[in-house]
Image (cartoon, grey):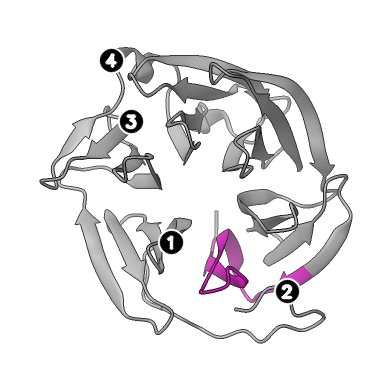
Amino acid sequence: MTAHHAPAPETQILLTGLALGESPRWHDSRLWFANWLAQEIIAVDPAGNREVILHVPFAAIPYSIDWLPTGQLLLSSSSERPLLRQEPDGSLVDHAGADLATLSPSFNELVVDGRGNAYLNGADFSALGEAGASAGVLVLVTPDGASRVVADGFAFPNGMAVTPDDGTLIVADSYGKHLLAFTIDPDGGLSGRRVWADLGDGTPDGICLDAEGCVWYADVPNRRCVRVREGGAVLQTIDLDRGAFACMLGGDDGRTLFILAAEWHG
């Protein structure tokens, strides 16, 4: 669906029949995403032609994907192997050391910066929604596979995006109802935590950055995608008939907004 064509962009269905689509990425002229529950990574072109790129060969949900500067695919997983790298022969190997699994009970979204630093967030998802819960963490996995917690205190850390200059990491805190920003330090650590945008009643899930430095965020309970600038001013809203889980800009000119949406009953 075309994004920057206010006030009423044309919308169309590109693909149906998904279990639950998440973590869309525009890569090699196609939209790639994780098809939760079906244990698949799918790529689809703008004409709707889909290809199953990877089927996770063990009982795990592939939560999120991104690529290393080498072009190798990374994926976060619900298994005891939370961060996997696809080798040239198609096999999946652990990208981080054994310590990674001790840093959070569960992991969720993944994003990689231009230096090969992988940022992975997680939380004790069994405690989500409890009053005052702020056990979410954000973990850095450096290119050599070392991992450490670089931020904590999230209510529910979710979608993430790195600015093109690799200088800032933006994180959606779904239950915090805001977008947080961090300065990315030379060693990959994070500093300068700040509220990038207070979203009012918005519940941000997946996010993406546009060419003007604004953020699109998907919102499941409010069934919409919203474009905001830093500070929280709302620039555009796309209302849907079901929950918006994630979004990504792509297409030939990078101005088509792809939204992964699904019915959600809790």
Compared with 178, 103 (above or below) is above
**Residue of label 2:** 4
Compared with 265, 133 (above or below) is above
Check disc 1 and give the amino acid type. Gly
**Where is residue 100, by image quadrant?**
top left
Q: Residue at x 56, y 29 (%)?
A: 127
C-alpha distance separating marks 1 and 3? 19 Å
Which of 185 and 154 lies nearest the eye of the viewer? 185
**Where is residue 33, by image quadrant?**
bottom left
Compared with 157, 10 (above or below) is below
Secondary structure at badge 2 equals loop
C-alpha distance separating marks 4 and 3? 10 Å
**Nearest to N terminus: mark 4 or mark 1:** 1
* Horizontal side, residue 256 vs residue 102: left or right: right
**Residue of label 1:** 21
**Nearest to N terminus: mark 4 or mark 3:** 3
C-alpha distance separating marks 3 and 2? 36 Å
Q: Which residues are magenta?
A: 237-264
Crowding at dot 4, Cα within 10 Å, few <14 / some 14-19 / many 20+, comes out as: some
**Residue of label 4:** 98
Q: Can the viewer see residue 207 in this picture?
A: yes
Which of 240 and 143 lies nearest the eye of the viewer? 143
* Horizontal side, residue 25 vs residue 241: left or right: left
Q: Which label is found at residue 208?
A: none
Residue 98 on image: x %, y %: 28, 15
Residue 85 on image: x %, y %: 26, 37
Q: Residue at x 31, y 63 (%)?
A: 42
**Disc number lying in front (3 or 2):** 2
**Nearest to N terminus: mark 3 or mark 2:** 2
**Where is residue 60, by image quadrant?**
top left
Secondary structure at badge 4 equals helix
